[in-house]
C-alpha cells in the first residue's frame, strides 16, 4: 500500500459518522444541546447525519450541529428538493410523493452511519418512524441509544 492510501485509510478511522434523529413531538432542546456539547473536542472527526425533518428535535439537531461546526448532512425524503445539506446526490430527490419515503430515509441513514442517537419519549407518544429506525439499527447491527 502506498503512502497516500495509508494516510486516507488512517484518516477514515478517525471519523465517526453519527446519526442523530428525533421524533416529531420531542422538543427538549437542552438535552439535544448537552448531548452535542459532549461530542466537542473528541479525538475523532464527527459527522452528524439527521433525517432532515422540519418538526421536533430535528430542528435543534441541525441548529447545534452547525453552531458547533460539525460536518452536517440530512437524509431528507426523496419527494423533497435537494438542498445544501442533503446527504444524497441531486438525482435522488424530486421524486413522486410516497408515504414510504419517510421510512426509507431512516434505513439509508442507519446504513450510512456507524452509531445512532435517537431522541424519543416512548411513553408520551407513538412514533412509527422512530420504531422503524430502532428496527433498522437492530437489523444492520448498528449501536444505538435512545434518549428520553
Image (cartoon, grey):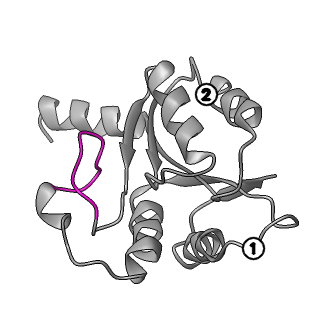
Q: Secondary structure beneath disc 1? A: loop
Question: Which of pointers 2 and 1 indicates the residue nearer the eye?
Answer: 1
* Magenta segment, prevailing SS (helix, strand or loop): loop
**Under tag 2, what secondary structure?**
loop
Q: How crowded is mark 1: few (under 14 residues within 10 Å), some or many (20 or more)?
A: some
Which label was assigned to residue 28?
none
Can you identify the residue that label 1 sits on?
Answer: 126
Answer with left or right where residue 131 lies relative to residue 133: right
* Residue beneath the point at 43% across and 51% down: 52
Q: Is residue 1 above or below residue 134?
A: above
Residue drawn at 24 percent across, 56 percent down:
88
Would residue 81 be counted in the magenta stretch? yes
First in sequence: mark 2 vs mark 1: 2
* Residue occupying the far right of the picture: 123
Q: What stretch is highlighted in magenta?
A: 80-89
The picture places residue 5, in percent across and down from the top left corner, at 16, 38
Q: Which of 137 and 44 is in front in this view?
A: 137
Q: Which residue is drawn at 33% across and 34% down?
A: 10
Left or right of 51: which side holds 78? Answer: left
Label 2: how many residues lie within 10 Å, few (<14), some (14-19) or many (20+)?
A: some
Determine whether 94 is above or below 114 in the image. below
Disc sitting over residue 39 in the figure: 2
> Could you give the CA–CA distance between mark 2 and mark 1, rounded to whole angstroms?
29 Å
What residue is shown at x 62% (from left), y 30% (from top)?
Answer: 36
Horizontal and vertical percent position of residue 41:
56, 17
* Residue 56 screen position, x and y as percent: 62, 50
Amino acid at each position: 500500500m502506498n503512502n497516500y492510501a495509508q494516510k486516507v485509510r488512517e484518516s477514515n478511522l478517525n471519523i465517526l459518522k453519527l446519526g442523530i434523529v428525533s421524533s416529531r413531538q420531542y422538543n427538549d432542546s437542552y438535552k439535544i444541546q448537552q448531548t452535542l456539547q459532549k461530542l466537542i473536542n473528541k479525538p475523532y472527526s464527527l459527522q452528524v447525519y439527521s433525517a432532515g425533518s422540519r418538526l421536533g428535535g430535528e430542528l435543534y439537531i441541525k441548529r447545534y450541529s452547525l453552531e458547533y461546526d460539525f460536518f452536517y448532512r440530512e437524509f431528507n425524503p426523496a419527494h423533497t428538493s435537494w438542498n445544501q445539506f442533503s446527504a444524497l446526490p441531486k438525482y435522488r430527490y424530486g421524486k413522486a410523493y410516497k408515504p414510504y419515503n419517510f421510512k426509507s430515509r431512516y434505513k439509508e441513514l442507519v446504513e450510512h452511519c456507524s452509531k445512532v442517537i435517537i431522541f424519543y419519549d416512548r411513553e408520551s407518544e407513538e412514533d412509527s418512524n422512530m420504531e422503524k429506525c430502532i428496527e433498522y439499527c437492530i437489523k444492520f447491527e448498528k449501536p444505538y441509544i435512545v434518549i428520553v
